[in-house]
């Protein structure tokens, strides 16, 4: 791996790259983060001390400020990461799909199935399929909002100023109006970001009564989630959804390299 060449390719899309050895807060296999210093944000690749990993840029789109990065590990496995700039900040996202070879294909691979179906059914111009807002969906970061004009909701069950989170401890996106259908009731806090079912929560409280003071929040896991109105997040521009939209998350969670991405929004 030629570090200088990698840095030059990141520089062509306007980004800085640093490469070093993994620290204690990183996964033992190393990973990719977004760091910041007095000069601003930069991509930070950390290498495990006992394994050689080869990184290669396999597609670079300076006009889009995006590139596709390939990581080859000693065991023969390969991982791909989409690196780029989205609205206000640099980001890195693990990409699913062995056949993905370019930036545009990576962006399409990250679209959830419901978004791709909406593209096929509603989009008039396929050239707009990667835009953050089109007839098929509105995107904010990793979240896709797909119009559901026929949805009927019970207004008494609509929540105001409700968070949505991918369950990894990152900052949630806030929704002005939110409605849930189905799913499992869970108790969530910083220590249990993916939530405990009520039976798991009760067992924990019975064994450790002090855990009751951990600032728990009731949420639904695996529910159908619908939002309308404003959706906001510190790292993204606020969007306004006219009418109800189904909430879907991108497909990063099924990508082989998803555990290597240290950066959390």
Image (cartoon, rainbow, N blue to C red):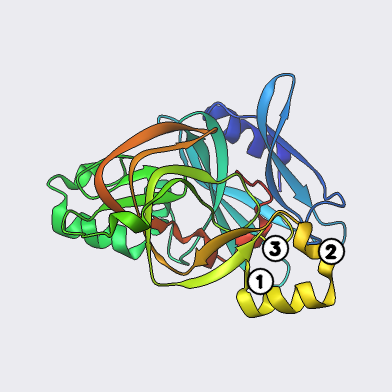
Percent of width and height locating residue 29: 77, 61
Percent of width and height locating residue 57: 56, 46
- Identity of the residue drawn at 80% across and 64% down: 211
The foreground one among 99 and 137 is: 137
- Identity of the residue drawn at 66% across and 32% down: 42
Q: Which residue is mark 1?
A: 76
Q: Quadrant of residue 209?
A: bottom right
Q: Which residue is mark 2?
A: 210
Q: Whole-Å distance between the Cαs marked 3 and 1?
A: 34 Å
Secondary element at image label 1? loop
- Identity of the residue drawn at 33% across and 65% down: 113
Q: Nearer the viewer, mark 3 or mark 1?
A: 3
Q: Against 183, is 12 above or below?
A: above
Q: Whole-Å distance between the Cαs marked 3 and 2?
A: 15 Å
Q: Earlier in the sequence, mark 1 or mark 2?
A: 1
Classify 10 Å Cα crowding around label 2: few (below 14), some (14-19), many (20 and above).
Answer: few
Q: Nearer the viewer, mark 1 or mark 2?
A: 2
Q: Against 256, is 64 above or below?
A: above
Q: Nearer the viewer, mark 3 or mark 2?
A: 2
Percent of width and height locating residue 252: 51, 59
Q: Against 188, is 125 above or below?
A: above
Is residue 246 visible to the viewer in this orientation of the structure?
Answer: no
Is residue 146 visible to the viewer in this orientation of the structure?
Answer: yes
Q: Earlier in the sequence, mark 3 or mark 2?
A: 3
Classify 10 Å Cα crowding around label 3: few (below 14), some (14-19), many (20 and above).
Answer: some
Q: Which residue is mark 3?
A: 192
Secondary element at image label 2? helix
């Amino acid at each position: 791996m030629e570090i200088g060449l990698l840095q030059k390719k990141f520089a062509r899309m306007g980004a800085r790259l640093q490469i070093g050895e993994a620290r204690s807060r990183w996964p033992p296999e190393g990973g990719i983060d977004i760091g910041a210093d007095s000069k601003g944000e930069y991509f930070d690749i950390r290498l495990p001390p006992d394994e050689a990993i080869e990184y290669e840029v396999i597609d670079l789109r300076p006009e889009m400020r995006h590139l596709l990065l390939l990581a080859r590990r000693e065991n023969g496995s390969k991982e791909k990461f989409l690196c780029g700039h989205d609205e206000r900040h640099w980001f890195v996202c693990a990409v699913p799909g062995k056949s993905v070879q370019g930036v545009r294909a990576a962006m399409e691979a990250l679209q959830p199935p419901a978004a791709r179906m909406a593209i096929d059914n509603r989009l008039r111009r396929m050239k707009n399929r990667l835009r953050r807002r089109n007839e098929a969906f509105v995107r904010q970061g990793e979240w896709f909002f797909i119009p559901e004009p026929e949805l009927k909701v019970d207004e008494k069950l609509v929540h105001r100023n409700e968070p949505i989170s991918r369950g990894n401890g990152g900052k949630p996106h806030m929704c002005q109006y939110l409605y849930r259908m189905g799913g499992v009731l869970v108790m969530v806090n910083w220590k249990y970001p993916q939530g405990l079912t009520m039976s798991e929560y009760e067992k924990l409280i019975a064994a450790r009564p002090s855990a009751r003071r951990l600032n728990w929040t009731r949420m639904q896991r695996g529910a159908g989630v619908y939002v309308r109105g404003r959706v906001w997040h510190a790292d993204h521009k606020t969007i306004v959804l006219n009418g109800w939209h189904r909430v879907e998350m991108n497909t990063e969670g099924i990508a082989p390299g998803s555990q290597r991405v240290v950066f959390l929004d």
